[in-house]
Each structure stands twice: as structure tokens, then as C-alpha cells.
């Protein structure tokens, strides 16, 4: 059913007749495992291409069929289209891990990625850097122009920061006017300061908020793993401590 075909259209056909080769190959391999080990595959979630060309999420169960001697004579497969359920789960997961205002990762997702970076760096005996950024006098923007203007400013800042980072880097919003940056592939303080300079440069141009021009600058603190901490709590604390050492005028 998830293939978009009627039972009549599927009779006598193999997976290779119904699906792209890469998908059919995985399905065939599952069939072979069920027959070889005489064990079912229960509720395996996988992607399958519908007749309309769109990918669907399906839950697949495959059961071995036995003859009287206990030999496997075939397989009975049951598949269920769970696309709507999976999309809802993905939506809830996104909501739980992203800041609703800027769409950036939130603190929980940042810390998850930070933990992974720590594990990788320990394994490879490497260094990496994090940054903690907050906005100077952000309260003034809210006081003068209102909170909606402040929200618009935060959105624009988030987009500008993202534009100068690599795909492997993460910028997250901590809440308020604080942002975190994870640089898992940055190995030297020189390169970390280059990234900080790029971030600072996006604040050179004023922001346009409700026909008003708003200028604002950030403060950035930098911490290195493992020099400034071997766990996330220590790294975050030391990034905050180093705020005063890297202001906008210092790069």
C-alpha cells in the first residue's frame, strides 16, 4: 500500500520491480537474513519510494514461513505507512531541540553536540573550541523600541552568525541575548580568533528594525578543550570568564 500500487499491480513482482535498486537491495538482504536465521524482523523503520516518487516512512515486519519439517519455505511481509506519525515525531523533536524564536539549536541540543565533540576529541587526542557570546546593552533595544523589535533583532543576528560559520559548526541560542558557538574542527586559538573576528564583523553593518537603524556589538568569550576544561560545565564557565578578554575592539 505504501508503494502506491494495488495488490493486482504487485502480484508476481519482486522488490527490484517495485522500488529503486538501493532500497530493493536492502529489502532483499533482510529477506535473506530472515530465511537464513529463521528469525523475524519486527517493526523495522525504513524509507520507501512511493509510486509518485516521494519518499515514505514505513514500518516493516517480516516473518519466516515453515513447512512441516521446519524448513523455511517463504516469508510473509507486513508493512505499514507511518509517514504522518514519523513527521509528527520529527516535528516534536525539532520543537524540543530548537529555539522557537530564531530556529537555532537550543541549549539542550548544543550540549548534546558538545558532549559528542568532547568524546571525539578525547578519542583522537585533539583540541576544539567553544564561544559564548552576549549582546552589549541589548536591554536598551528592548527599552527603546519594545520587545518585538528585540525579537526581530535576535532573528537577524542569528542569521548573520550562521552565515559566517561552517556546516560542521553549531550556533545555539541560550535564551535572552546569549548565544553559544561550537567549533569542533577548529584546532588552534589563532583559528578560533579568526572565527570570532568573522562573527564580530557581521555586527559592523547596523540592523534595520521597524524602519529604525540599530547598532549593537557583542562580547565573545572563548574556551578550549581540554586546556580550559575537560567537561561541558567547566568549558562553559571558562568561556564566560573570558568575556572581558575579547571585546569587539580587540580583533
Image: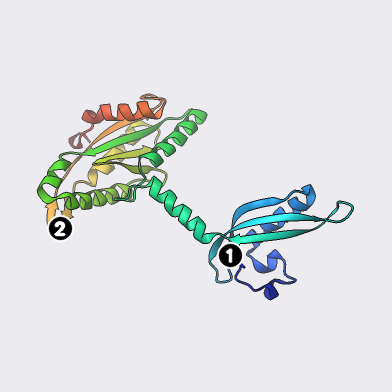
Q: Nearer the viewer, residue 32 or 64?
A: 64
Identity of the residue drawn at 33% across and 30% down? 236
Where's residue 120, x and y in %? 49, 33
Q: Which mark is residue 49?
A: 1
Q: Is residue 235 above or below residue 79?
A: above
Identity of the residue drawn at 39% across and 39% down? 108
Q: Which mark is residue 210?
A: 2
* Number of marks drawn: 2
In screen coordinates, is 1 left or right of 86? right
Where's residue 162, x and y in %? 32, 48
Asked which quadrant contains residue 230, the reply is top left
State which quarter of the image contains the N terminus. bottom right
State which quarter of the image contains the C terminus. top left
| Label 2 element class | loop
**Farthest-out residue, right:** 69
The alpha-carbon separation of the residues under discs 2 and 1 comes to: 46 Å
| Label 1 element class | strand
Identity of the residue drawn at 34% across and 43% down? 171
Asked which quadrant contains residue 173, the reply is top left
In screen coordinates, is 18 left or right of 50? right
Q: Is residue 90 above or below residue 170?
A: below
Where's residue 70, x and y in %? 86, 51
Amino acid at each position: 500500500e505504501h508503494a502506491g500500487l494495488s495488490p493486482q499491480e504487485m502480484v508476481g513482482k519482486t522488490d527490484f520491480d517495485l522500488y529503486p535498486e538501493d532500497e530493493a537491495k536492502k529489502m532483499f538482504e533482510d529477506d535473506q537474513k530472515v530465511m537464513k536465521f529463521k528469525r523475524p524482523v519486527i517493526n523495522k523503520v525504513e524509507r520507501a519510494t512511493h509510486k509518485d516518487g516521494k519518499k515514505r516512512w514505513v514500518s516493516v515486519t517480516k516473518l519466516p514461513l515453515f513447512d512441516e519439517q521446519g524448513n523455511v519455505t517463504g516469508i510473509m511481509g507486513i508493512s505499514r505507512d507511518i509517514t504522518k506519525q514519523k513527521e509528527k515525531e520529527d516535528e516534536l523533536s525539532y520543537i524540543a531541540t530548537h529555539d522557537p524564536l530564531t530556529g537555532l539549536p537550543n541549549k539542550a541540543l548544543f550540549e548534546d553536540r558538545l558532549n559528542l565533540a568532547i568524546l571525539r576529541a578525547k578519542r583522537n587526542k585533539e583540541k576544539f573550541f567553544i564561544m559564548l557570546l552576549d549582546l552589549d546593552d541589548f536591554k536598551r533595544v528592548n527599552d527603546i523600541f519594545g520587545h518585538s523589535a528585540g525579537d526581530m533583532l535576535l532573528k537577524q543576528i542569528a542569521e548573520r552568525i550562521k552565515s559566517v560559520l561552517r556546516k560542521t559548526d553549531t550556533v545555539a541560542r541560550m535564551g535572552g541575548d546569549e548565544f553559544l558557538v561550537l567549533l569542533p574542527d577548529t584546532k588552534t586559538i589563532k583559528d578560533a580568533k579568526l572565527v570570532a573576528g568573522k562573527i564580530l564583523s557581521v555586527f559592523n553593518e547596523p540592523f534595520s528594525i521597524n524602519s529604525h537603524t540599530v547598532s549593537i556589538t557583542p562580547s565573545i568569550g572563548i574556551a578550549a578543550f581540554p586546556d580550559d576544561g575537560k567537561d561541558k560545565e567547566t568549558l562553559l564557565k571558562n568561556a564566560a570568564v573570558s568575556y572581558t578578554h575579547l571585546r569587539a575592539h580587540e580583533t
